[in-house]
Each structure stands twice: as structure tokens, then as C-alpha cells.
Image: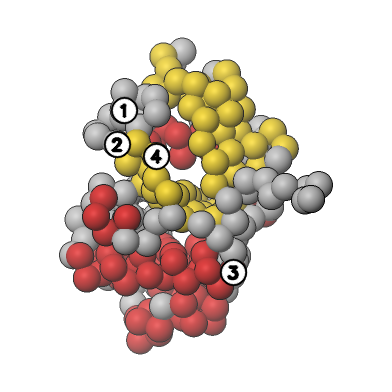
């Protein structure tokens, strides 16, 4: 018998969080295990971004808790990042005034490792990130996050405004990181069909609740 059953890398337990004392998600319990991709679906305003913000410590829990590797966490995002929690927010989190190379240097994983994940970034290293296409910018954001070899990665609206071909490329990179490195992924995605092609499980959020 297994006396130490596998525990989730990231878990919310009866999490309530929101803005100005107004809950946007209520009593939310979800979990993500190592090596799996979990999709979080829901209509606009359902509370998907709020859930991710609470998970990475950018929004406080009003009640309930977020657990990181079994322990309740209240640390700020930079501390969680050092512990292996990576977050790619909505809207391409690249520094547009810096080159691709410098954007990658700002990450914890460095330039070489990001190029191993997305070879497409190689010829673009000296280009200013603001000049990249939307798909290339998202590749940069994701490559920088994956290069840091996180234990868990939270991605908000990965495919916003991107062509299906690019989205497929990004999702495959997540899939192989989950399989190769045991990465736990919580993925907010509008395009359910594409997300389901790589996800192991999914949750549907509606009006702030599952
Ligand atoms: P979308 O798919 O449109 O990004 P979402 O599912 O991510 O939506 P959230 O952004 O989490 O939804 O929003 C949940 C609720 O919280 C909405 O009613 C929204 O209006 C509200 N909300 C979001 N951000 C704030 C904020 N900074 N201040 C006050 N209310 C907010």
C-alpha cells in the first residue's frame, strides 16, 4: 500500500477571492498534479483570471487557501517563483523595449534553454520584443517561463488573438514539458477544442464557482 499518496503540486481549497471585499470566485477547490495539464474554462467574467491571481499570490484569499506542494501559502509571487511557480499572465508579458535576448536574460532559465524549447526564437534574439508578432511574443513569454524549469506553470489566455497554428505549437510545448519534466500546468484557454487536445482534465467555472 502506498503510505504517501501523491499530492497535488498546486491546490485551492474552498478558495474565495475577489476585489474590494466583493468575491469574484467562491469556495473554489481545484488541484493540479505533476505531469498533467488542467484546463480552466468559463465564459467572460467567470473568474478564471481571479483564480490564477490568487494562486500566484497577487490577490489575497478572502477565505479558504492555496496550497503549494501540500503547504498553505501566503508568500508573494517572487518567493513562489523561486520555489518553482511560474505565471504567464494574459496579454504577453514581454518587455517590449528590450531585445528578445534581454527578455530571456531576465528569466530564471537563461537564453540557451529557451532556444532549446523554441528554436524559432534563435534568429530573433537581437530583435526588439515589441517588433515581434503576437505569436512570437507569446512564444517568448512561454519560452522564458519554461526555461526556468518550473514545477508548476499557470497560463492565462494563451491563445488570445493568435492563429490556430501558433496556438498548436505553444500547446505542444506545454505538453512535452508536462511529459518530459513533470510540469504541472493550469491553463486558461478560450479555445476549448485546442485546449482539450492536450489537457488531461478540465474544470468549468461559471459565475465564480465550479
Ligand atoms: P475573461 O475571460 O473575460 O478574462 P475571467 O473569467 O478571467 O474573464 P475575471 O477577470 O477573473 O474573469 O473577473 C471575474 C469578475 O471579477 C468579473 O465580474 C470582473 O468584472 C471582476 N473583476 C476583475 N478584475 C477586477 C478588478 N480589478 N476590480 C474589480 N472587479 C474586477
Give me the disc on residue 203.
4
Label 2 or label 3, whichever comes before in sequence order: 2
The quarter of the rendered structure image containing the C terminus is top left
In the image, the residue with mark 3 has its CB under 8 Å from the nearest atom of ligand 1: no
Q: Which quarter of the picture shows residue 150?
A: bottom right
Residue for badge 2: 42
Question: Looking at the image, do the residues carrying marks 1 and 2 touch, with CB atoms under 8 Å apart?
Answer: yes
For the residues marked 1 and 2, what is the alpha-carbon distance in whole angstroms?
Answer: 6 Å
In the image, the residue with mark 2 has its CB under 8 Å from the nearest atom of ligand 1: yes
Farthest residue to the front: give it.
Answer: 1
Instruction: Nearest to the eye among marks 4 and 3: give it.
Output: 4
Q: Is residue 165 left or right of residue 150?
A: left
- Give whichever of 70, 156 is nearer the camera: 70
Secondary element at image label 2:
loop
Q: Is residue 141 above or below residue 29?
A: below
Residue for badge 3: 181
- Give whichever of 80, 209 is nearer the camera: 209
Label 1 or label 2, whichever comes before in sequence order: 2
Amino acid at each position: 500500500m502506498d503510505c504517501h499518496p501523491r499530492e497535488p503540486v498546486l491546490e485551492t481549497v474552498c478558495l474565495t477571492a475577489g476585489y474590494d471585499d466583493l468575491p469574484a470566485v467562491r469556495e473554489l477547490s481545484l488541484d493540479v498534479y505533476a505531469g498533467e495539464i488542467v484546463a480552466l474554462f468559463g465564459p467572460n467574467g467567470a473568474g478564471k483570471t481571479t483564480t490564477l491571481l490568487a494562486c500566484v499570490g497577487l490577490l489575497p484569499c478572502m477565505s479558504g487557501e492555496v496550497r503549494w506542494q501540500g503547504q498553505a501559502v501566503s508568500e508573494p509571487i517572487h518567493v513562489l517563483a523561486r520555489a518553482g511557480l511560474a505565471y504567464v499572465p494574459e496579454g504577453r508579458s514581454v518587455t517590449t523595449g528590450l531585445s528578445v535576448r534581454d527578455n530571456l536574460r531576465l528569466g530564471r532559465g537563461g537564453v540557451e534553454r529557451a532556444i532549446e524549447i523554441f528554436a524559432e526564437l534563435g534568429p530573433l534574439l537581437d530583435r526588439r520584443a515589441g517588433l515581434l508578432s503576437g505569436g512570437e511574443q507569446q512564444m517568448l513569454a512561454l519560452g522564458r517561463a519554461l526555461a526556468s524549469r518550473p514545477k508548476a506553470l499557470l497560463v492565462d489566455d494563451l491563445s488570445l488573438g493568435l492563429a490556430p497554428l501558433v496556438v498548436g505549437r505553444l500547446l505542444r510545448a506545454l505538453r512535452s514539458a508536462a511529459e518530459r519534466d513533470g510540469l504541472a500546468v493550469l491553463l486558461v484557454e478560450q479555445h476549448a477544442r485546442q485546449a482539450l487536445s492536450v489537457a488531461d482534465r478540465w474544470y468549468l467555472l461559471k459565475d465564480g464557482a465550479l
